[in-house]
Image: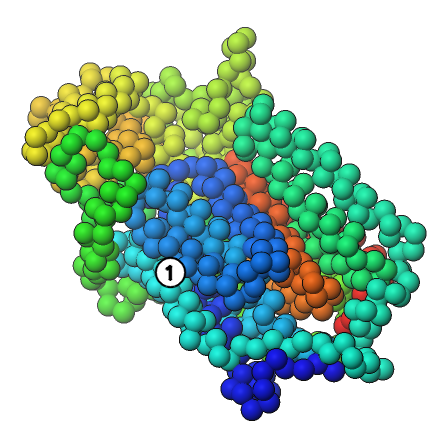
Amino acid sequence: MAQNTSSPNSLASRTFLGHPLGLYILFFTEMWERFSYYGMRALLMTYMVTYFRWSSAEASSVYKWYTSLVYVTPIIGGFLADRYLGNRAAVFIGAILMAIGHFLMAFEATTIFFAALLFLILGNGFFKPNMSTQVGRLYPPNDRRRDGAYTIFYMGVNLGAFLAPLICGWLQENTKGGFHAGFAIAGVGMLLGLFTYMFGQPLLADYEEDPNKPTAASQIMSEADAEKAPSILGDFQVWIPRVLWAGVAVLLPLGIYSGVNSGVKAAAPAVISAISLAAVAWITQSVKNAVRDRVTTIVVIGMFAIFFWAAFEQQGNALNLWADKVTNRYLTQVAPLPSVFPDVAEIFPDVDDNVDGKDPAFVDSILKSLGRFGEIFQLKEVKTGGEASLINPVPTAWFQSINALGIFVLAPVFAYLWVKIDLSIPAKMVAGLMLMGLSFLVMVLGAASENQKFEVTIKGALPKMMVVDESGFLKDGTRDTIFDENGKMKTGTHNVHAGRLKIIGEKIECFGVFSDLERNELAMLTTPQSFQKEVERAMKELNNQKTGGKPRHVEIILPPEVRGFDLRYGGFHPKGVEFDQSTKKLTIKQVLADKDQKALFVCAADPDFRATLDELMGQTSISRVSSQWLLWTYILATMGELCLSPVGQSMTSKLSPKRFATMLMGVWLLVSAFGNFAAGAMGEIYGTTPPIAYFGYMTLALLGAGTVLIFLVPRLTRMMHGVK
């Protein structure tokens, strides 16, 4: 039996619907934390490609590292909590760090953006594993309520995940602050989670196992008994930590060597893998017999779960871009042709505040932005169209709520099924992988529906700087050096529009939706170098300009090579950039970020080729696909998630030896880290791989992993030694 650390009559010992009141404190704390995380995640990819004007590959790289590291740091946070801080102190530290990170996201500077991600990564490391562990510690060992508790807790996760995209996405679409308003409200959610946890402390009390009372026959094997019970793996068990340490010995030097010779990007995966293996090796070396079997089961199942999370996290990456650029988001009316010009910036930084002629420092940038922080929540002018305009178009972020809504509807169904159908935990993991595979099979069909053929006539002559291979496919020269020293095209050159854009005589042949992002990338290739150098000179002059308190500015007279300059392509506020058509004079009143310089390059691109690309955007927009493809993809993914995610957390809580409980919860979350890394790595090729192939690769990987795991189910079930 187990005893409560609180007195029988204390508030912490009371229950509601059969569960301790402390569970509901953890429920609402996690709900608000997940509100902040999923609100930010719903906007992150579209923010990077739309606001910063990064390519999908560049944005996916940032997304990969961010979403991976938020699941790497929990193993460190779990270790510090187990050994030094305790669960509660770690949660407080994590919540404060994450609140800071979310509010930093409300500011515009790129340096602040990366600082915000760092705060979020570190805060999540302290917060995440300690919340999950505290749920299990509310109950005595082998308490049948524990699975139900994790299901309730998981509902809190998904309540936050459901509300966040709706609220943050609406603010992004309808306020002057746009993305920054959505990020700010995510920070408010994190503060609400912190206050909930703070004021709910009297309701949280851990159970502790009484070592003086014997284990009842009806209970599962206790940890003490499991230390003595023979291992299912037999003699091979002693090799498990040795193999893991060997992996550390190989990966760590490889990572260090890569870091010295190729930079952090090459070194980090090897180093993170080595640290992860070292943690697991230390744990498996510290336990023995049946306990080691249980720990090994967590690790093996986790390896297969990586495939699941690599696919699931496409929701925030490739599937988010698919929703934004390829899905018809008009539900009750015909979608209009896409505008070739971006919206004019609603808010533009004051142009007369940098009187010293230098860019503001990190802290100064924040202080400057705070002065107009309230403006970001001001509503844009109401669009015409009545109530229909509220859902036409549907905000891109709203698609992220489908998964959470599916959890609410389907969780009771799956809870009933687990009672009626006696499936082992490994068998449930197989079901999760297979269902996720089917969800991406739906996307393969959706991609086939989008893959329609279009042709437009090239206006004027094809610019000389357009790179075309022997088969007529356009290549992207913005990411790689196109030709080698012998003048031959390199084999690694990226395809434009995933290899679905081809020059045939005087026409361009295109398959599928050609978006504004791809238009901009191609158009910038035709911007005269003389203009690019003028912009570079102007930025240096603005940085060095001493204004004496007067608004600073610099003027550019367009070089003769620039034809058809059109400032509308930049989306600039007139307060920041002006153009006089009669004198060909461009006036810039603020140091422009990289994203704004790119926008100027689009304005100065070859007008004939740019007009050709505009026509291509309009024509191909009719191949935008129904939102039902994403709907059914997310429903099947949700069914897979219900088979794997809450079951996995409960499994880790049950199988973990107590002295390593939080750290092993961190290891389970580390599975998500590798899955997120794989998701981001796949996202880096999303724009260069045809969608049918891209989603097809995911389908085959998931179904293949599920098939292999089927053969391991009997052995893994026995290695759990009675745990259900």
Between 188 and 485, the one lying in front of the other is 188
Between 413 and 132, the one lying in front of the other is 132
Is there any visible trace of residue 607 in the rendered image?
Answer: no
Between 539 and 254, the one lying in front of the other is 254
Q: Identify which residue is drawn at 78% across, 38% down.
A: 246
Q: Identify which residue is drawn at 74% across, 82% down.
A: 1
In the displayed structure, would residue 123 be above or below residue 505?
below
* Residue 143 coordinates in the image, percent (x, y): 70, 80
Asked whether, in this view, residue 22 is left or right of residue 527, the answer is: right
Toward which corner of the image does residue 342 lie, by quadrant? top left
Between 62 and 627, the one lying in front of the other is 62
In the current view of this chain or complex, which residue is farthest to the bottom?
9
Asked whether, in this view, residue 176 is left or right of residue 294, the answer is: left
Toward which corner of the image does residue 520 lie, by quadrant? top left
Asked whether, in this view, residue 297 is left or right of residue 385, the answer is: right
Is there any visible trace of residue 284 in the rendered image?
Answer: yes
Q: Amino acid at mark 1?
A: Ala
Q: Identify which residue is drawn at 58% across, 51% down.
A: 76
Mark 1 residue element: helix
Q: Which residue is mark 1?
A: 186
The quarter of the image holding the C terminus is bottom right
* Residue 718 coordinates in the image, percent (x, y): 85, 65
In the displayed structure, would residue 714 be above or below residue 212?
above
In the displayed structure, would residue 315 be above or below residue 466?
below
Q: Identify which residue is drawn at 8% across, 30% down.
A: 548
* Residue 68 coordinates in the image, percent (x, y): 55, 47
In the displayed structure, would residue 204 be above or below residue 269?
below
Asked whether, in this view, residue 217 is left or right of residue 191, the answer is: right
* Residue 544 coordinates in the image, percent (x, y): 19, 24
Disc 1 crowd rating (10 Å Cα; few below 14, some 14-19, many 20+) is: many
